Image (cartoon, rainbow, N blue to C red):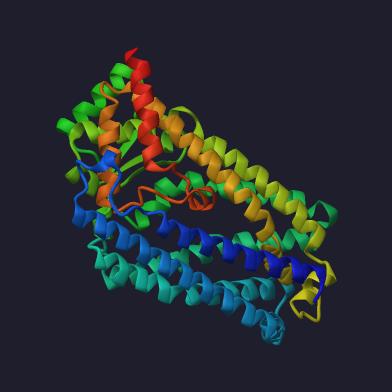
């Protein structure tokens, strides 16, 4: 095995062991009784369900991860990458067409490997705890739309990527960085307008007590709200949530219909204030900038290794191809992801604290945010005591107990 192969294999195994350890430790970290902070909203039955849900989710994730890893290693060491290259190459198409078909088939295989676990997670685990509202027709339709979008948007992007590396020489990585950056910004621009409505219905928040409360919050704090929508989240799940996406006048703040049904008006306004905090503090463009920088690093590294024969030999490929190099580089980037992933998660958690502070200092009563977060956690059976390792590698949000304590400190400072 070449050095490339040893690095990739070690990274894959280490990543699986790390994720599995975090999942197991996360289950063990759950207390027998709920934290005192939640004594007023969590009864014994709900806490028992929370513990069971966390265990079932972790079991599914570990099983899924193990199966995917075994499948990948079997395909790798059985010469699957080389076999597929010979199979597609026998069609005698142009290099670009062969490259797109080769990578497209690998992505399709990957989707098929993951599909049984997604079905089980949706229709067994989520249904077991009363979360699933997704019908089989909706599930199939969502998957079909995802495949179609991959073809319409991903196909041309992949063709352009391979074209640059084939015809632009030493500047290929720079062209690819520009292309990837433009694609990322384009997706963020059109997602709120064209893509998200393909999967969910977004309707303007109607007039009423909630809209009046939101307008009052906006006017009091001189904060423009922008586009505010109700999303039919109940079509797929009973969980509650809210989010903000997009830029400028195309920014979209969405409230799940389930949240509006289950929360008081002050609580919904508090959640909205948190989401507005992300927008006011520029978290979306900041995270996008970091993503663009990371893309540049990846494109630079890709240009050095993409056509390296040793990388291809590690996967038993007899010839050097652009599509092979691009495929294998995604695996070679696993060690880099192990480093950058926790860093990006740390930044995200930092931004969550900042958005909480924004909400706490602009709301009439910061404790409305605490009440909303507690209800969100209980309704979604969230793990209230995650293990630190799980937080470091997987959580984009801080542990809820720490968030609540930080909000209370903001309240004390505000009152003081």
Find residue 225 and report its horizontal and vertical position in percent: 34, 29
User: In the displayed image of the protein, which residue is found farthest to the left?
Assistant: 208
Q: In this view, does 380 lie to the left or right of 300?
A: left
Q: How many labels does the image show?
A: 0
Residue 91 appearing in the image? no
Q: Which residue of the protein is positioned furthest toward the front in this rendering?
A: 32
Res. 14 visible in picture: yes
**44, above or below 109, in the image:** above
**Vertical relation: 303 (above or below) 225:** below
Q: Is residue 272 above or below residue 89?
A: above
Question: At 63% from the left edge and 55% from the top edge, which residue is drawn?
Answer: 338
Residue occupying the point 42% across, 31% down: 355
Q: Indicate the quadrant containing the N terminus: top left, top right, bottom left or bottom right.
A: bottom right
Where does residue 294 sit, x and y in percent of width and height?
Answer: 66, 47
Say above or below: 202 vs 314. Answer: above
Question: Would you say 97 lies left or right of 114 here?
Answer: right
Image quarter where the C terminus lies is top left
26 or 230: nearer the viewer: 26
The outermost residue toward the top is: 416
Q: Which of 97 and 141 is in front in this view?
A: 141
x, y percent for residue 250 = 42, 38
Residue at (40, 70) in percent of width and height: 118
């Amino acid at each position: 095995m070449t050095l490339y192969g040893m690095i990739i294999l070690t990274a894959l195994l280490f990543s699986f062991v790390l994720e599995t350890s975090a999942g197991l430790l996360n289950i063990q970290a759950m207390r027998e009784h709920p934290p005192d902070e939640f004594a007023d909203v969590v009864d014994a039955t709900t806490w028992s369900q929370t513990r069971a849900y966390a265990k079932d989710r972790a079991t599914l994730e570990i099983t899924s991860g193990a199966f995917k890893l075994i499948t990948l290693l079997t395909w790798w060491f059985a010469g699957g990458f080389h076999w597929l290259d010979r199979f597609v190459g026998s069609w005698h198409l142009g290099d670009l067409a062969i490259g797109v078909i080769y990578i497209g088939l690998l992505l399709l295989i990957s989707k098929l490997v993951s599909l049984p676990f997604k079905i089980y997670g949706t229709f067994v685990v989520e249904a077991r705890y009363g979360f699933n509202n997704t019908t089989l027709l909706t599930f199939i339709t969502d998957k079909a739309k995802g495949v179609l979008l991959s073809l319409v948007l991903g196909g041309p992007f992949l063709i352009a990527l391979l074209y640059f590396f084939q015809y632009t020489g030493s500047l290929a990585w720079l062209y690819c960085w520009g292309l990837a950056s433009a694609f990322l910004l384009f997706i963020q621009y059109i997602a709120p307008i064209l893509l998200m409505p393909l999967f969910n219905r977004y309707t303007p928040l109607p007039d009423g007590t909630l809209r009046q409360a939101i307008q009052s919050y906006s006017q009091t704090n001189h904060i423009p709200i922008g586009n505010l929508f109700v999303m039919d989240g109940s079509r797929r799940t009973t969980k509650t949530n809210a989010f903000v996406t997009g830029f400028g006048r195309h920014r979209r703040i969405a409230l799940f219909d389930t949240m509006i049904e289950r929360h008081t008006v002050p609580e919904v306004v508090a959640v909205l204030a948190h989401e507005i905090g992300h927008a006011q503090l520029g978290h979306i463009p900041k995270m996008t900038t970091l993503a663009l920088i990371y893309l540049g690093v990846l494109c630079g590294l890709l240009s050095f290794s993409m056509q390296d024969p040793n990388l291809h030999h590690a996967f038993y490929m007899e010839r050097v191809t652009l599509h092979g190099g691009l495929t294998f580089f995604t695996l070679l980037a696993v060690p880099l992801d192990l480093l950058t992933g926790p860093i990006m998660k740390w930044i995200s958690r930092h931004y969550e604290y900042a958005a909480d502070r924004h909400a706490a200092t602009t709301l009439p009563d910061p404790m409305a945010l605490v009440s909303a977060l507690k209800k969100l956690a209980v309704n979604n059976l969230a793990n209230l005591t995650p293990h630190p390792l799980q937080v470091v590698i997987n959580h984009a949000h801080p542990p809820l107990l720490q968030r609540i304590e930080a909000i209370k400190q903001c309240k004390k400072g505000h009152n003081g």
